[in-house]
Amino acid sequence: MATVRTRAVQTNEVGRAPAIALAMNEIGRRTGAEPSLLEVGCSAGLLLALDRYRIVGGASAIGPSESPVRITPEWRGSPPRLDELAIHRRVGLDLEPIDVTDPIERRWLEACIWPDDAERRSRLRAAVEVRLDPATPNISLRRGDALDGLAAAVASIPADRPLVVAHSWVLAYLTPARRRAWFSKLGELGGEREIWWLGIEQRDSVPELPAPLATLHHTPATELSIARARPAPWDVERLASLHPHGTWIATDARRQR
């Protein structure tokens, strides 16, 4: 298996946007810069517009108050610190990017939602509305394989800012050998410029996920982790665990490194 066909498996679950915002905030604070964002397995690129959604975290909220997309996950553990996002450039990489300007493509996206899940369907339609809004910052979608197209996608983004390479429930669709090759390639690219890894995956499905240096307590939940990508072993930090669709997010009481 040489490719990852996100068209068939990714339903643009923008419910994961709060988790990505949490991680982007953390990376932004550490770098002191406005990072660019590359999403691998982006489908229609709806998550790349996450700063155009109203995200509620504890007593705080970020994003436009008038946004048609309002995401309020159940936060478990310490209330998160969410700051308004600053994203320099946005690029998506997908084997078969979905063009939301095409009504047939939009119908395909809706077909990927479970028939009885009216809430997610409504949120998907609202996210498409935001994506098509001229006020939404430019999002560039590239056609390419998750592994074979990674270097070219990274090279398309100027290296004058830190780059966050993110993925959510994508690597599970690669073979174990290609998952190992993917992390190796990302580390190699991180040796040439500042790259941060932002992963949202389930360890049971992707055992190749780099683990925190401390003993990792097992969780069947999806994990939100970050690390500075580099050739040597990464200093990985797990920020939270979450429901696969982001309906709840549990910030770790003791962040694991």
Image (spheres, grey):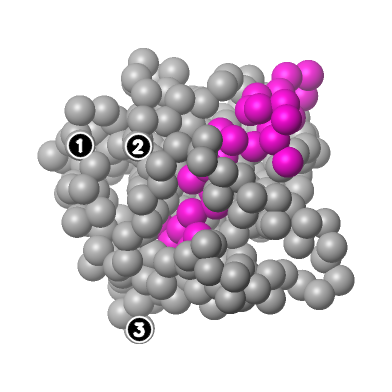
The answer to which quarter of the image holds residue 158 is: top left
- Residue 53 location, x and y as percent? 64, 37
Q: Earlier in the sequence, mark 1 or mark 3?
A: 3
Q: Residues within 10 Å of mark 2 (few under 14, many from 20)?
A: some
Which residue is under mark 1?
158
Which residue is at a point 37% across and 23% down the rendered structure image?
A: 34
Whether residues under marks 1 and 2 lie with C-beta atoms below 8 angstroms apart, the answer is yes
Q: Which mark is residue 89?
A: 2
Give the x, y percent position of residue 74: 80, 39
Task: State the CA–CA distance, disc 2 to disc 3.
Answer: 31 Å
In the image, what residue occupies the spot 48% across and 67% down? 98
In the image, what residue type sits under mark 3?
Met
Image mark for residue 1: 3
Is residue 17 placed above or below 9 in the rendered structure? above
Task: Examine the structure image and report whether residue 238 is included in the region drawn in magenta.
Answer: no
How far is the residue under mark 1 from the one under mark 2?
9 Å
